[in-house]
Amino acid sequence: MFPKLLLMFLVLLTACNARPAGKNSSASQSRRVISYVANISPTGEFCRQPDGCQWRMIDPRTGSDELIMPLEGIPLNVWWNPEYTQVYYRLESKLFRTAWRVGAKPEMVFTVNEVLARKPDTVITIEDIWQDGATGKWRLKTLQYEGVGENERAVAGVWEHEPNGQQWFVLDKQPTECGCGDCACASVMNKWIEPRPRVALHELLDTMRAAWHLDRASADEDWAEGRRSFISLASPRVSYEFDLVFGDSYHAMAPFVLQRGGSSGPQTIYPKGGPCGDQLSFAEEAGFLLLTAEYTGACGRVVNLQSGATIASLPETAKYAAWLERPKAH
């Protein structure tokens, strides 16, 4: 029990600093839409043709599903400035910047070829890219697997970009036992990770996880595992039921059932054995529920909590679904 309580203290402490920007008022929420990237292959390796990858948005108030902009590849390491006027994302070895506007055209910021170079028995993944809050210099975090079989190990690194060139210099590298690079190495890496204010997609997806909703459990059972009921933010007469399990953290597991007061019975929003797996995340805005696969934002379900109607049911090829500020029109 002690490790769980310690973990929850750390989660709630982090929540004070990691809550996504732009959710402080009902006026702000009224402008928000559900953004997602369409036409990603089920393996997440390429864009499906003929349409290719597309950034799209759903307005749950009208049910519209509109194109924001076409993409030349799968966007990675995505983040917005706090005002939602610009968005940054990586396509393979190139970082792009574009206005958060319908039909906007991207411009390349720089390349990261040296860091992405494949060496024998080495695979490097770029986990994050940001501008340092103090110096404004570009930094990135990598997770590198060295060796094969029993000799394989993971090493996390933080690199800094030379302002007047294309070279990257390593600031710190530490071995880690955590596959995501964010656990065992966190204490030694965090001193290098102080980005300028931003809204990072991976943080938006993370704060949809069940671990962020534990204070809404309907019964005070010390966050016990098992079939649990969680009160909706939309109304105390609306609740969600799912299996709560604990591993590295708390997770919501299918089936995910909506319970609405009155004569309506339970409504299964996402069944067990769905196309995107059973680990789920959810977030509510202005009376609407967004339910997705955990971490990936895939297989999104958008539900009107007042009527119980499913407004949108996205396939596994639509990923990164999250509530965001509406992009500006043309």
Image (tube, rainbow, N blue to C red):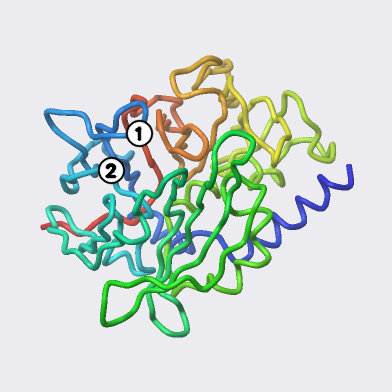
Mark count: 2
Coordinates of residue 152 in the picture (x, y in percent) = 59, 41
2 or 1: tag closer to the N-terminus: 1
Specify the label residue 74 is tagged with: 2
Residue in the image at 26% along x and 38% along y: 62
Label 1 Cα crowd, 10 Å radius (few <14 / some 14-19 / many 20+): some
Cβ atoms at labels 2 and 1 below 8 Å apart: yes
Coordinates of residue 260 in the picture (x, y in percent) = 57, 26
Residue in the image at 42% along x and 54% along y: 126
Image quadrant in which you'd find residue 136: bottom left
Most extreme residue toward the right is 2
Coordinates of residue 324 in the picture (x, y in percent) = 37, 53
Q: Is residue 157 left or right of residue 95?
A: right
Residue 231 in view, yes or no:
yes
Identify the image quadrant of the C terminus: bottom left
Residue beneath label 1, please?
Answer: 44
Q: Secondary structure at mark 1?
A: loop
Specify the label residue 135 is tagged with: none
